[in-house]
Image (tube, grey):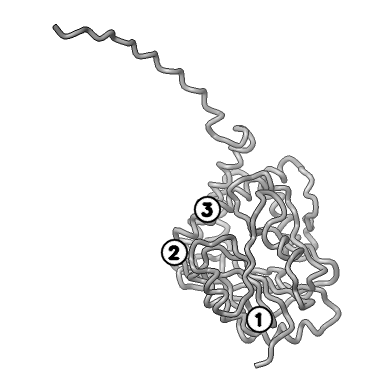
Amino acid sequence: MSKIPVSVLIPAKNEELNLPACLTSVARADEVFVVDSQSSDRTGEIAERYGAQVVQFHFNGRWPKKKNWSLENLPFRNEWILIVDCDERITPELWEEIATAIQNPAFNGYFLNRRVFFLGKWIRHGGKYPDWNLRLFKHQAGRYENLNTEEIRNTGDNEVHEHVILQGKVGYLKEDMLHEDYRDIYHWLERHNRYSNWEARVYLNLLTGKDETGSIGANLFGDAVQRKRFLKTIWVRLPFKPMLRFILFYIIRLGFLDGRAGYIYGRLLSQYEYQIGVKLYELRYCGGQLNTAVTAPVAPPAIPQVEKQAVP
C-alpha cells in the first residue's frame, strides 16, 4: 500500500493504552512524529516499535505549548500536516479522502469531523456530533491561537481547546475521524480537572474583555469554530450554567437518545461546568487561590513550659 505524502504529529504523555491503535491507524502516512513529554510508561518504546520518530518536549511553563512548538521545530519533510491525538483513529476511508484532498490547490486546510465514543457508545447527540476540528493543513499556513492563558498552572503542556489559525481557504472532509479513549473514567476526570483550569481563564478573559492576541475571534456568521466562539461570549454571562449545560445536552439536544452513556456524559459535563465556575470565582475574587479569601486562623496560645522537678 502506497504512502500518502502527509506528516502526522501525535502529542503524547503516558499513552501506552491508546497509542498502538492510533499508530496502526496512521500507517498510511509518509512519516509520523510522536512528541512525548517524558512519559513514565512505555509510550516511547511503543512509538519506536511502530516506526514513529520520537521527540521529547520540555515545557517551559508558558509558551509555546507542545503542538505549536512541534510545528515550529520539527523537520517535517511534507507540506501537509495531520494532527492526531493518541485517543483518535484515522479510518481507511478517511485516508483515501485525505489522499485526494491534498491534491486540491484551492484549500490550505481541512476540517475533520470526529465521532466521540464514551463508555463504548457513539455520543451522536447532545451537540457532540458533528464535531469539526481543523487538523489537516499546510505546515507553513497554520498555527494554534494564543488565548492568553499561560499564567494558569496545572493545565498541561498541550493545546487542547485552542484552535488553528489558518492562512487561506478551508474545506471540509466527509469521512469521520474516531475518538475513543481506552483509559478508565479516572483519566477522564483527571484530564477535565486540568481542562477546567484553562477554561476558567478563558471565561475570565471573555468577561473582562482581555485582548485575545492571535485568536480566531467570534463571529455568528463565520465558520463552525467562529460561531462556537461567539456563542461562548454569551454563555459565560449566563447564570446556573451547570444546570443549563445538562439541560442543553441531555434534553434540548437529545442526549437522552444515547442511553445510559448519554446520561452519564451529560452529568459529567454539568460537573465540569461547575468546576469551571468555582475556579473562575477563585480567579476573580481570591487572587487565584481560594484560601486567600479566608481569614488566617489565630495562632494558638503558646504551651507553657513546666520546669521539671528533680525526683527525690
Which one is earlier in the sequence, the residue at label 2 or at label 1? 1
Q: Nearer the viewer, mark 3 or mark 1?
A: 1
Which one is earlier in the sequence, the residue at label 3 or at label 1? 1
Q: Is residue 82 above or below residue 293?
A: below
Residue 79 in picture, x, y percent from top left:
79, 77
Q: Amino acid at mark 2?
A: Asp
Give the secondary structure at mark 1.
strand
Q: Amino acid at mark 3?
A: Ser
Q: Which residue is mark 2?
A: 184
- Distance, label 2 to label 1, CA atoms, is 27 Å
Q: Residue at x 74, y 76 (%)?
A: 172
Q: Nearer the viewer, mark 2 or mark 1?
A: 2
Q: Residues within 10 Å of mark 3 (few under 14, many from 20)?
A: many
- Distance, label 2 to label 3, CA atoms, is 19 Å
Left/right of residue 57 with respect to residue 256 in the rendered view: right
Q: Amino acid at mark 1?
A: Glu
Residue 82 in picture, x, y percent from top left:
70, 74
Q: Nearer the viewer, mark 2 or mark 3?
A: 2
Q: Which residue is mark 1?
A: 175
Q: Which residue is mark 3?
A: 270
**Does any portion of residue 76 appear in the rendered image?**
yes
- Distance, label 3 to label 1, CA atoms, is 30 Å
Q: Residue at x 68, y 91 (%)?
A: 2
Q: Nearer the viewer, residue 90 or 123?
A: 90
